Image: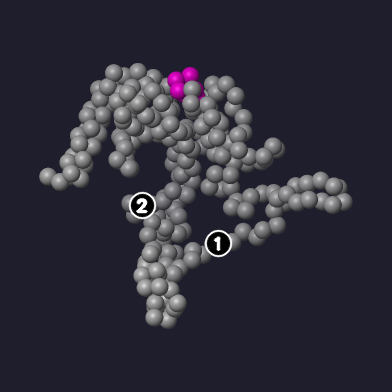
Amino acid sequence: MTDDAGTAGAVSHRLEELSLAVARALPDTLSATTGYAGELTYEVAADRLLEAAVRLRDGDSLKFEMCMDVCGVDYLEYGRAEWKTQDATASGFSRGVSRFAAPDGTRAETLASGRRFAVVYHLLSVSLNQRLRLRVFCTDDTQPMVDSVTGIWASADWFERETFDLFGILFKGHPDLRRLLTDYGFIGHPFRKDFPLSGNVEVRYDPEKGRVVYQPVSIDPRVLVPKVIRHDNRYDPALTNAPPGKLDA
């Protein structure tokens, strides 16, 4: 067995042990979902979030003492994207993707209620050197809200404010839920999928008023076309001044 194979086997064994520990500590509370980057990902119902968070923090085989990040997700256009952006070929990015086709091939013309906004928590156990990702969906799409976990992980304070600012997700029980990154008086939440790419307002200096003023954005919305680089004779090293191998770097 090579060193790489041995390392992969050890990581897989640790993930399996963690998965069993989670199943013992939170039976019928968490449901496993597709994981990425070698981390376990679980989903929890909104009304059981705080219960699960406490058990993940205090469980003897879990000990997730730190909340490293809190992220918002807007699934408004999930599975209905016009552009296929996972990969590109010599012909560029495909626009032949059905706008209402889900990843499994089924049509997803409407989004299920209570499945638009989600909050994702990235947890770290310092003492046991293990990580876990926890996701909870907001049951109300109009006014998304979940319980604040600041009473369990104090580090979530800043992250929840950021998520509120950018996604408009409310955190019940947060001690100071104010905008964090956007300007004073900003309207809307810029990371929502239905927020215009060019924004709603722009600023400029008005010499007559002697101050900066806000006005409706003057940029016309348009569909952006990805840049496509094709390998043809224009890039032949023999026809350029580039050193050999430079174009391949």
- Quadrant (top left, top right, bottom left, bottom right) of the N terminus: top left
Q: Give, as a three-letter code, the residue at label 1.
A: Val
Instruction: Determine if residue 43 is in view.
Output: no
Drawn side of residue 216 relative to residue 138, left or right = right
Helix, strand or loop at label 2? It is: loop
Q: Residue at x 25, y 22 (%)?
A: 24
- Contact between marks 2 and 1 (CB within 8 A): the answer is no
Q: Is residue 152 magenta?
A: yes
Range of residues picked out in magenta: 148-153
Depth check: give the residue in front, 115 or 91: 91
Q: Give, as a three-letter code, the residue at label 2.
A: Pro
**Snapshot quadrant of residue 245:** bottom left
Depth check: give the residue in front, 115 or 242: 242
User: Disc 2 designates what residue?
Assistant: 103
Residue 211 against residue 169 in the figure, above or below = below
State how far apart marks 2 and 1 are (Cα).
Answer: 22 Å
In the orientation shown, which residue stands out farthest toward the right? Answer: 208
Residue 30 against residue 60 in the figure, above or below = below
Per the rendering, the mark at residue 223 is 1
Can you give x and y, in whole percent of width and height, for residue 164 in the image?
56, 34
Can you give x and y, in whole percent of width and height, for residue 201 in the image?
69, 49
Q: Nearer the viewer, mark 2 or mark 1?
A: 1
Q: How many marks?
A: 2
Residue 242 against residue 225 in the figure, above or below = below
Q: Residue at x 38, y 64 (%)?
A: 249
Helix, strand or loop at label 1? It is: loop
